[in-house]
Image (cartoon, helix red, strand yellow):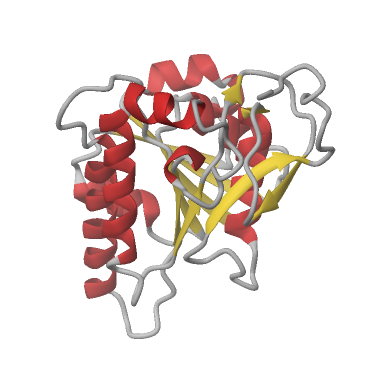
Amino acid sequence: MATYAILGSTGNCGSAIIQNLLKSPNNKVHAYCRNQTKLQRLIPEVVDNKNVQIFQGSIYDVELLADCVRGTKAVFLVVTTNDNVPGCRVSRDCATSVIQALQKIKAEASPGLKLPKLVLLSSATIDDHLARHMPGWFRPIMLAAASHVYEDLRLTEVFLRSHADWVSSIFIKPAGLSVDVSRGHKLTLDEEESFISYLDLSAGMIEAAADDESRYDGRNVGVELSSRGELRCVLSWD
């Protein structure tokens, strides 16, 4: 049985990850959130579920975070914000606290402890390769509209990569997201697709985290529909 920690459990992506994980009785969930009541309202399946442990607290509570991520296979960093304000560091603060928690766990453990992988929700918009097919007029608009949020994500990636010698990270970079049903997904190192649902995005994140061959460690990973073109007939960049 594999245990996964989700930081940002009440957000669209975090709740979708939990819903997908709970489809299998072989998964255990450590759900980290600021408001347990809100989480239970959003995802009734977590109530009295023996495979779910809820950790309620601040993202700055390193002791509680250490309890949450200890013994897990992967930690999903999906704490996000839509507020594009100067000095935004929501993602960096989350990553910093997680690294501090892992340092604490490592210091207290016996040699040879296997630490969880970190799976960061980032964006294809800040990736020159994945975003290379975005229209020339569109990407600059997106970068300007969420400039502080994107800078926070960029610096978070730099920070996590600086710890790559002892912690593996995967950087998930979707394009446009929507609240929709699952239509099937596939992982890619070369493409982005708008739009995919949070359910498909989260399924892709779980797949990358569960990959025992570590093919996605340290990589920028896109998530697209398994049947490309299903939505492109309606949503086109042209």
63 horizontally vs 49: left or right: left
Q: Residue at x 46, y 48 (%)?
A: 127
The residue sitting at the left extreme is: 87
Q: Nearer the viewer, residue 48 or 164?
A: 164
Picture quadrant where residue 109 is located: bottom left
Question: Quick one: quadrant of the C terminus?
Answer: top right
Judge left or right: residue 130 versus residue 122: right
Whether residue 219 is visible to the viewer of this picture, yes or no, is: yes
* Residue toward you, 134 or 227: 134
176 or 34: nearer the eye? Answer: 176
**Residue at 62% across, 69% down:** 215
- Rendering coords of residue 2 (x, y %): 60, 57
In this picture, is 188 found above or below 60? below
Residue 13, placed above or below residue 102: above
Furthest-bottom residue in this view: 111
Residue 188 at x, y percent in the picture:
67, 53
Q: Is residue 68 above or below residue 144?
A: below
> Would you say residue 1 is visible in this rendering?
no
Residue positioned 57% across, 35% down in the render: 134
Q: Is residue 92 left or right of residue 51?
A: left
Residue 37: quadrant of the picture: top left
Residue 7 at x, y percent in the picture: 39, 40
Residue at the location (32% across, 47% down)? 154
